[in-house]
Image (spheres, rainbow, N blue to C red):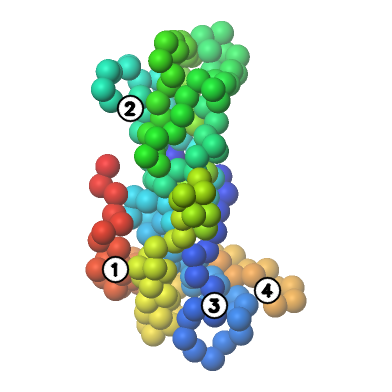
């Protein structure tokens, strides 16, 4: 049941949040923010939760059996943005089908509940026959207005601290993944195992209350 990132995540801090003498749009600091956030955020991170707004795709081979008193589907990497979930599947004849939004609802930020009386359809015998695409993360809209709220401050602080740690260690602990040299330029970084361990140790105490274990 893999989950992959289709787009995002949106950064949860900016270079202006990082102490130091650099521009508000400094590309190196921006790249460090992305690298640190990738260590904790969404399917690629260890937190088990989506922080920056992102579009995810969850695939599985079949729809689950329905059990009274329990939710029908559990979507990984909450928080799920209500109204963003699109459920499609490949039927036994190999044709792509989409379940009408009126036939299900999202509950408690990660659970999908199909309406009473809805019969889950048969699917093709492939490991990716069922495809669920949804937005996850904090969208800045208050919960009472139907949004997912603001990014928790402790998550922002963890990313800020991680970037400060990256700035403090040797540049050899960063691996340049791509670079576009035009104008200011765009840089993307991944971090080494050593740097990732430093980031994790620095941020775990801030993120313990946000971690999702299942």
Work out whether residue 151 can be spotted.
yes
Query: Which mark is on residue 185?
Result: 4
Image marks 2 and 3: residues in contact by CB distance under 8 Å? no
Using the image as rendered, state which of residue 52 and residue 93 is in the foreground: 52
**Marked residue nearer the N-terminal end (4 or 1):** 4
Element class at badge 4: loop
Residue 182: where, in percent of width, then height?
74, 73
Q: Which residue is mark 3?
A: 15
| Residue drawn at x 34%, y 50% as measured from the top left | 48
Gap in Å between the C-alphas at discs 4 and 3? 15 Å
Earlier sequence position, callout 2 versus callout 3: 3
3D distance between C-alphas at marks 2 and 1: 30 Å
The quarter of the picture where residue 62 lies is top left
Crowdedness near tag 4: few (<14), some (14–19) or many (≥20) residues, C-alpha within 10 Å? few
Q: Secondary structure at mark 1?
A: helix
Q: Quadrant of the N terminus?
A: top left
Decide which of 60, 212 is in the foreground and name it: 212
Residue at x 37% of width, y 39% of height: 108
Label 2–label 4 contact, CB within 8 A: no
Q: Write down the residue under mark 2.
A: 71
Q: How many marks?
A: 4
Residue nearest the viewer, comparing 185 with 110: 110
Figure check: 68 above or below 171:
above
Q: Pointer 1: what residue?
A: 206
Q: Residues within 10 Å of mark 1 (few under 14, many from 20)?
A: some
Q: Residue at x 52, y 49 (%)?
A: 145
Q: Say which label, 2 or 1, has the lower sequence index.
A: 2
Q: What label sits on residue 91 in the rendered view?
A: none
């Amino acid at each position: 049941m893999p989950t992959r990132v289709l787009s995002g995540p949106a950064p949860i801090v900016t270079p202006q949040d990082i102490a130091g003498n650099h521009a508000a749009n400094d590309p190196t600091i921006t790249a460090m923010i992305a690298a640190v956030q990738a260590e904790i955020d969404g399917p690629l991170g260890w937190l088990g939760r989506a922080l920056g707004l992102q579009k995810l795709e969850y695939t599985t081979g079949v729809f689950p059996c329905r059990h009274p008193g329990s939710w029908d589907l559990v979507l990984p990497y909450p928080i799920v943005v209500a109204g963003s979930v699109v459920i499609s599947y490949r039927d036994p004849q190999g044709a792509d089908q989409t379940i009408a939004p009126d036939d299900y609802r999202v509950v408690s930020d990660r659970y999908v509940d199909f309406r009473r009386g809805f019969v889950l359809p048969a699917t093709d015998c492939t490991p990716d026959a069922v495809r669920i695409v949804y937005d996850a993360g904090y969208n800045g809209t208050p919960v009472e207005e139907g949004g997912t709220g603001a990014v928790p401050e402790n998550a922002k602080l963890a990313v800020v601290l991680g970037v400060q740690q990256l700035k403090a260690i040797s540049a050899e602990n960063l691996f340049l993944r791509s670079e576009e040299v035009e104008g200011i330029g765009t840089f993307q970084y991944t971090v080494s195992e050593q740097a990732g361990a430093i980031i994790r140790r620095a941020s775990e105490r801030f993120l313990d209350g946000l971690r999702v274990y299942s």
